Amino acid sequence: MKLLKNGIIGALLFFTLGVTAQQISKNALGVRLGDNDGFGGEISYQHYLKENNRLEFDLGFRNSNNVDAFKLVGLYQWVNKLDGRFNWFIGAGAGVGSYETPNNDGIFALVAGDVGIEYNFDAPWVISLDVRPELGLTNDYSDDLDLDIALGIRYQF
């Protein structure tokens, strides 16, 4: 198990550090639609920082298993060229939100990772598919690991 863990960490470092820089749009605004034991939608904004780094902010809702949640997540991402117009990205961040169930409501905090692939069209649009593992830090609602899988469509400017 230790060998597998070290191999995965080594591969991530190699791919993250061993790639060439590329062009990332200064800004991108769109939606991120996904599934985390239900359905959710987010308004998604990406902002270029430098070379192959950007920030992503997602504000939206989730509806799952008799729970309605509203959350804001911020991520720092490393974007790497894959092939042609395809990029892959990896990132980490955190978020806060509120939830409501039939019996309870409250607020929560989370830490998140992110890994995905995106395609930049010849027009100013980008489409992406990503997986965002989220680990809740507070209360009974969010104290487990959730895999937020989503499709993103953004306009680049």
Image (cartoon, helix red, strand yellow):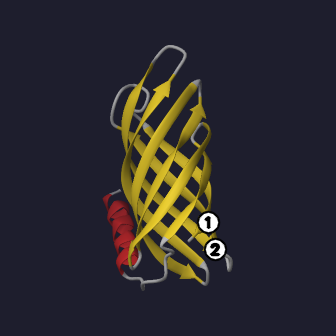
Q: Residue at x 48, y 73 (%)?
A: 26
Residue behind mark 1 = 155
Q: Position of residue 137 (x, y in %)?
A: 33, 36
Q: Residue at x 34, y 71 (%)?
A: 10
Q: Secondary structure at mark 1?
A: strand
The quarter of the picture where the C terminus appears is bottom right
Q: Position of residue 108 (x, y in %)?
A: 38, 33
Above or below for 146 versus 120: above
The quarter of the picture where the N terminus appears is bottom left
Residue behind mark 2 = 124
Which mark, residue 30?
none
Residue type, mark 2 in image = Pro
Q: Quadrant of residue 35?
A: top right
Q: Residue at x 34, y 72 (%)?
A: 13
- Judge by depth and name the residue closer to the eye, 19 or 28: 28
Q: Position of residue 138 (x, y in %)?
A: 33, 31
Residue type, mark 1 in image = Tyr
Q: Secondary structure at mark 2?
A: loop
Task: State yes or no: discs 2 and 1 in contact (Cβ < 8 Å).
Answer: yes
Above or below for 3 versus 35: below
- Judge by depth and name the residue closer to the eye, 144 or 154: 154
Q: Quadrant of residue 151?
A: bottom right
As drawn, which residue projects farthest toward the top?
103
Above or below for 84 versus 144: below
Mark 2 or 1 closer to N-term? 2
Q: Position of residue 90 (x, y in %)?
A: 44, 65
Graded by Cα atoms within 10 Å as few (under 14), some (14 to 19) or many (20 or more), the crowding at tag 1 reads: some
Q: Is residue 84 left or right of residue 74?
A: right
Q: Residue at x 56, y 47 (%)?
A: 42
| Number of on-image labels | 2
- Judge by depth and name the residue closer to the eye, 143 or 150: 150
What is the C-alpha distance between the residues marked 2 and 1?
Answer: 6 Å
